[in-house]
Amino acid sequence: MPVIKSAIKKLRKDRAREVRNDEFRKELRDALRAVKKNTQDVKVLQTAYSVVDKATKRNLLHPNKAARMKSQIAKTIKPVASTKSKKTVSA
């Protein structure tokens, strides 16, 4: 345990940040799971993009990882959109 007064304060702040970041990481995981379950819903997609961007802004994710996540999310949505367009063209 820290002995110096400023180190004690820093430890207290670090623990509070850790709790806040863990809650936000849980929100991020839940948003990504929701996208996997509801590949048709655009609102879920927008929410996931927003959460990923916020995580990047808070330095919980590296910007490249966030871009990769958003790309993977878009890939899950894209095949559904392409199958719809093929049906309308062939019909």
Image (tube, rainbow, N blue to C red):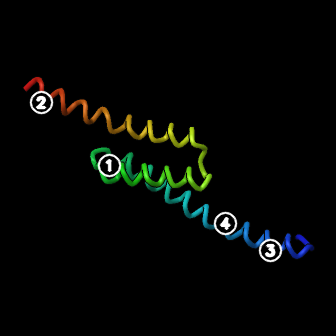
Which residue is outermost to the right?
A: 3
In the image, residue 11 sits, relative to residue 73, either above or below, namely: below
In the image, residue 1 sits, relative to residue 72, either above or below, namely: below
Q: Amino acid at mark 3?
A: Lys
Label 2, label 4: how far apart the Cα atoms are: 51 Å
Q: What residue does disc 1 label?
A: 38
Earlier in the chain: of badge 3 and badge 1, it is: 3
Given this view, does label 3 or label 2 mark the residue nearer the observer?
3
Q: What residue does disc 4 label?
A: 17
Label 3, label 4: how far apart the Cα atoms are: 12 Å
Which percent across, then down, holds residue 52? 49, 50
Q: Amino acid at mark 4?
A: Arg
Q: Amino acid at mark 1?
A: Asn
Whether residue 5 sits left or right of residue 71 in the image: it is right
Residue located at (67% from left, 64% from top): 18
The local secondary structure at tag 1 comes to loop
Q: What residue does disc 2 label?
A: 88
- Count residues near mark 4 (Cα–Cα under 10 Å), then give few for <14, some for 14-19, many for 20+: few
